[in-house]
Amino acid sequence: MQWRTKTLDVLFIFLLSFSYVLSQVSYSIPEEMATGSVVGNIAQDLGLDVKRLKSGKARVYTGGTTEYISLDKERGVLVIKEKIDRESFCGETTPCVLHFQIIIETPMELFRVTVEITDINDNTPSFTNDVKRFEISESAIIGSKFVLEKAIDLDIGLNGLQSYSLNPTDNFALKLENQADGSKKVEMILQKPLDRENSEQKSLLLSAFDGGEPQMSGTMQIHVTVLDVNDNSPHFTKPVYKATLTENSPKGTSVMTVRASDKDKGSNGEISFAITNSKRRFSELFKIDQTSGEVTLVGNIDYEKNKHYQVDIEAIDNGGLSDSSKIIVDVIDVNDNRPLINVLSKSENIIEDSPPDTVIAMLSVSDPDSAENGEVECSMISSIPFKIQSTLNGFYSLVTDVALDREVASHYNVSVTCADKGVPSLSSSITLTLQITDVNDNQPLFEKTSYEANVAENNPPGISVLMIKAIDADWNQNARVSYILEDSSINGVPVSSYVSVSADSGVIHAVRSFDFEQIKDFHFRVKAQDGGSPPLSSNVSVKILIQDQNDNAPQVLYPVQTGGSLVAEMVPRSADVGYLVTKVVAVDVDSGQNAWLSYKLQKATDRALFEVGLQNGEIRTIRQVTDKDSVKQRLNVIVEDNGQPSRSATVIVNVAVADSFPEVLSEFTDFTVDKEYNDNLTFYLVLALAVVSFLFITCLVVIISVKIYRWRQSRILYHSNLPVIPYYPPRYSDTLGTGTLQHVYNYEVCRTTDSRKSDCKFSNAGSQNVLMMDPSSTGTMQRIQSEKSILDEPDSPLETRLVFIIPQFTFNVDI
């Protein structure tokens, strides 16, 4: 029942809303005002008496929404009924406006009230998470970015989120970057390297501030755990370890235990020990425990051959860092020796186009053993493009075997193995790392054989069209590709006036705004050149296709709209339904659907008499013409294209409904000429019309002057009051195949010098006529003399024939 009552109230208000004048009052209040707070004196602002509010049973109407503001009829003021939270009521919408109406009955009046709710700083900037944790390696480079969470503040304007701060800033700095939606991207930038050995944990505080009064802020804790990297090498407790050992010491005898420490943590601090090569190979005699560092005897000691040994040991952590020390052992009887390989000279780099047999290293190989145990042969694997050659006794050269190609392999690990001829044979190996230096032997190659891109016309200059990319298989400077726009011309204009190319990125930009009606596509070439010396290059063809936009309005070709004359289509009163009056012909220089035209009748003197074909622009009658129809009919036809947004043009078609020319002539004599000139007349048409008019007037003045002189001022020319009827081809036909019928009207008018009356004869009356008249003109006249010259009989009555030629209409007047 309540719903029905409210519906009837709304309907009643709607029905009566047109019988009184609406008034509107606006207020502005801050949000969160206490219940009962005064919004404004509505009675005073509306110019009403408080008694009127009581007697008229004034009430607030909100349209079914929550009533935040109520009316105190005793005081005539608006008060807060329910506290308003702007963030809940409007969210981010600004301005936040509350609309309601004050309704007064008997008599009924309606007043609109608008209350703007302004923001107060009642919300604190806050983060979704109170704590943000990062695990950052101590090897992180300077400038590393770490994205932080953005704060949220429901307030707007100055009361909204304004700034951030980060403390402390020993290792990190705060970077703010504006984004497209108006918010700020918050990043933490590493500005000082981290050192886990000094501090493994770091705590930072990110604060967000608004711009309100008083200023409010929110914070988020940032905990950074510094991850260890292997930046500390092991360190032996002694630089040299010494021990003594008798020659009869059994295998497995403990020689000593070495110690080393590493400041790193975890696996980076785990140390393994090893014996490295020195002057002799000691792996057959001594062994060191990788974990404990205990050195034990694993071979036989021969004092006669060597009284002491110097063993190099190495402490290596899991990251590959190491420290070395030395063990000096006084022993007897060193029985076995491996070949010792020394690198006399080596090249760290070699140019890839080096010829075969280029020396890359020289080695010296020796074995302290005697006889065959001291004879050494060196070899290497055959799958690499190198070979080893013996130069002198104990000296070897490592040379290239074939031509090198850095693009196939940028470096080689060359392993050389030297073995003696002892039984069993002992051998040693060495590995050399060789880098292949690049030469500029590869030209840049584009990813595509040609590129093509589409650009909408009327584009803003500087827009990015497409990006081309070329890849050079070389390295470093030889592979640095630059893009160059090759010189060419488009329609006689340099291509640089159309596009530009970024030398570094290969991005092609449009220099100018393109017009599809002037140019539909164009080609040009771009060269990619590397940074080698001499540079190598290649080029690619780029085709830009201009896409049409609906930027041209339709142009009406027929009927022609002239500034000082009136064009009228003639329709007989006997015309049937569907009679073709004329056809509006228009074109659109755009293409595609932008050039699809439709025709509509915008307004007409009698809309029930004519219609316009939607697609072909034909104007036809839609009912039988009656005698009651006005002779003068004016149709406004609008031509629209199919573009988005659509563009249009309007043409005025004047139609004369009559069965005879005199009826049309008498009716159109007082016809008001339309002064709405066609603004689309081109300069050339106006210039041509002016020249032709000047020549015509000049010739007419000359002829009249000659005639006046010859007639000896005996006759006064007769000035006709008939309107100008310009000449059109008498057998006009529609080139589109839907046109009008061909008609010729012949009129004969006979007139004497003592009479102001004329006799007219009509013949070949057709169903469609075009009449053009200019009330301001004196007419166009063709003189036809009779067989007896007027000059020969000056006293005879003046007799001339005027021929008026109208499209599909011929009019002859004899005077």
Image: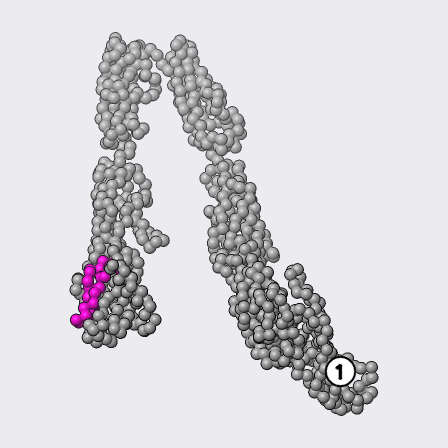
Q: Which residues are magenta?
A: 64-86
Q: Is residue 457 left or right of residue 59?
A: right
Give the residue at x 25% y 17%. 295
Give the residue at x 58% y 70%. 653
Name the one closer to the observer, 367 or 480: 480
Residue 812 colored magenta?
no
Residue 409, placed above or below residue 711: above
Q: What amino acid is labelled 1 in the image? A: Thr
Name the one closer to the observer, 555 or 539: 555
Under circle 1, the secondary element is loop
Residue 197 in the image: state x and y as whole percent: 23, 36
Residue 119 in the image: state x and y as whole percent: 24, 60
Q: Which residue is mark 1?
A: 800
Q: Is residue 176 left or right of residue 482?
A: left
Disc 1: CA contacts within 10 A as few (<14), some (14-19) or many (>=20): some
Instruction: Describe the colour scheme in one phrase.
Output: one colour
Q: Which quadrant of the rendered structure holds the N terminus?
A: bottom left
Give the residue at x 24% y 37%. 196
Residue 423, placed above or below residue 599: above
* Image quadrant assignment for residue 563: bottom right
Residue 75 colored magenta?
yes
